Image (tube, rainbow, N blue to C red):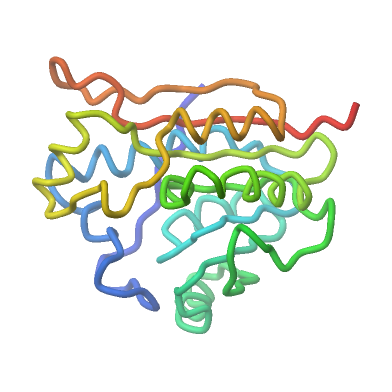
Amino acid sequence: MPHEKLHLLPLKEYAGIDSNDPIRFYFWPLVGPLYRRRVELCLDECKGGGRVLEVGFGSGLAFINLSSFYKELHGLDLTASIADVGALYKKHDVDTFLKNGSVLAMPYPDGYFDTVLCISILEHLKPQELDGAFAEIRRVLKKDGLAVYGVPANNAFMRFCFRLLGYDIRKHHFSSEHDVAAAARRALTEVKITAMLGGVPFSGSVYEIGLFVKRTS
């Protein structure tokens, strides 16, 4: 089965985000393919259907892909400008339903989504907040709905790589991939967890993609 290829817009088109958004990294040599690949691996686990919710959509870089296999595309983000991001994708014939809000208290009814997608979001929560986040994800999912997440690996190699990019991830990433997986298992049924390797000697896993399902019996 071919992998989903991330459809990016020209960098200058992205709007509605602050200067800390990592969108620029997706266009850099060497780093860019790794950033794109982690999103593509998450997209590969999204099976399509009626409604998808991307939590922490930021610049909306996965929106064009998601719109090709879901009927309704919803997004929730703490800080992104829903007007600017929505207008951008409207120009590209992608209709969106965007809101500002938190994964810890999502403004949606029970059983509303076929898929909830969280790319590089859950590591920013503290470990004690993860159970609340997954309780909300479970609540808004339909029966047999899918939760797909991606989180960076918390290891020495990744901390070094982020320092090269100017980030001390210990100041931004509070939960490890192990914390996230454990909380997901308490709320949902694990289908699989996939490790993305860094592609250089001794790098090990650099990213982890989780696929979980809501079972009601």
Q: Nearer the viewer, residue 89 or 35?
A: 35
Q: Is residue 139 left or right of residue 182?
A: right
Q: Is residue 132 left or right of residue 26?
A: right
The residue located at (15%, 16%) in the rendering is: 202
In the picture, which quadrant includes the C terminus? top right
The residue located at (41%, 40%) in the rendering is: 5
Depicted 183 relative to depicted 74: above or below: above
Depicted 151 relative to depicted 86: above or below: above
The residue located at (22%, 60%) in the rendering is: 24
Percent of width and height locating residue 23: 29, 60
Depicted 2 relative to depicted 173: above or below: above
Q: Is residue 168 left or right of residue 111?
A: left
Q: Residue furthest left?
A: 164
Percent of width and height locating residue 136: 71, 52
Q: Residue furthest right?
A: 217
Quadrant in the picture for residue 144: top right
The residue located at (27%, 53%) in the rendering is: 171
Quadrant in the picture for residue 72: bottom right
Count of marks placed on residues: 0
Q: Nearer the viewer, residue 67 or 21?
A: 21
Percent of width and height locating residue 100: 57, 74
Q: Residue furthest front?
A: 128
Percent of width and height locating residue 213: 72, 31
Q: Residue furthest bottom?
A: 83
